[in-house]
Image (cartoon, helix red, strand yellow):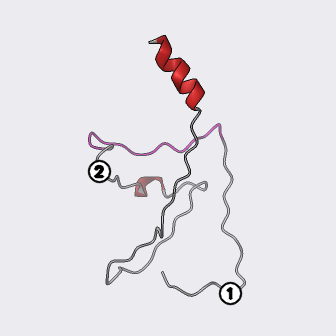
């Protein structure tokens, strides 16, 4: 992982086949803790990137923003039916 832009290198691609979906690995605490997905790395429809062990904390997400649109009229109609 580095902060320099790549030179002229090809894009990473994969082919998605809806008849063969990738199933995530789960455990009892899957909704509360990260899960090791390495057992799925052999698949040709998954891209895997690896680096040397990082020597310090690194933020890789950047600023996160959300634009949420809501149908207020539909929500009001749903609430009135209850």
Residue 12 painted magenta: no
Residue at figure coordinates x 58%, y 42% from the top left: 69
Question: How many C-alpha atoms fall within 10 Å of the one at disc 1: few (<14), some, or many (≥20)?
Answer: few
Magenta stretch secondary structure, dominant: loop
Q: In the displayed image of the protein, which residue is found farthest to the top?
A: 81
**Residue at the image position 42 percent from the left and 54 percent from the top:** 39
Residue 78, position as x, y percentages in the image: 51, 19
- Whether residue 21 is in magenta: the answer is yes
Q: Quadrant of residue 12?
A: bottom right
Residue 73 versus residue 58 in the image, above or below: above
| Magenta region, residue range | 18-29
* Residue hosting label 1: 7
Which is more toward the observer, 70 or 52? 70
Task: Count residues near mark 2 (Cα–Cα under 10 Å), then give few for <14, some for 14-19, many for 20+.
Answer: few
Residue drawn 50% across the image and 84% down it: 2
Q: Which residue is the site of mark 2?
A: 33
Is residue 40 positioned above or below 10 on the image?
A: above
Q: For residue 7, which quarter of the picture?
A: bottom right
Residue drawn 29% across the image and 51% down it: 33
């Amino acid at each position: 992982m580095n902060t320099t832009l790549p030179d002229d290198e090809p894009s990473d691609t994969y082919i998605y086949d809806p008849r063969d979906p990738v199933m995530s690995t789960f455990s009892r605490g899957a909704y509360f803790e990260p899960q090791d997905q390495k057992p799925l790395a052999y698949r040709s429809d998954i891209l895997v990137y690896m680096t040397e062990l990082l020597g310090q904390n690194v933020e890789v997400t950047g600023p996160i923003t959300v634009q949420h649109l809501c149908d207020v009229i539909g929500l009001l109609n749903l609430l009135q039916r209850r």
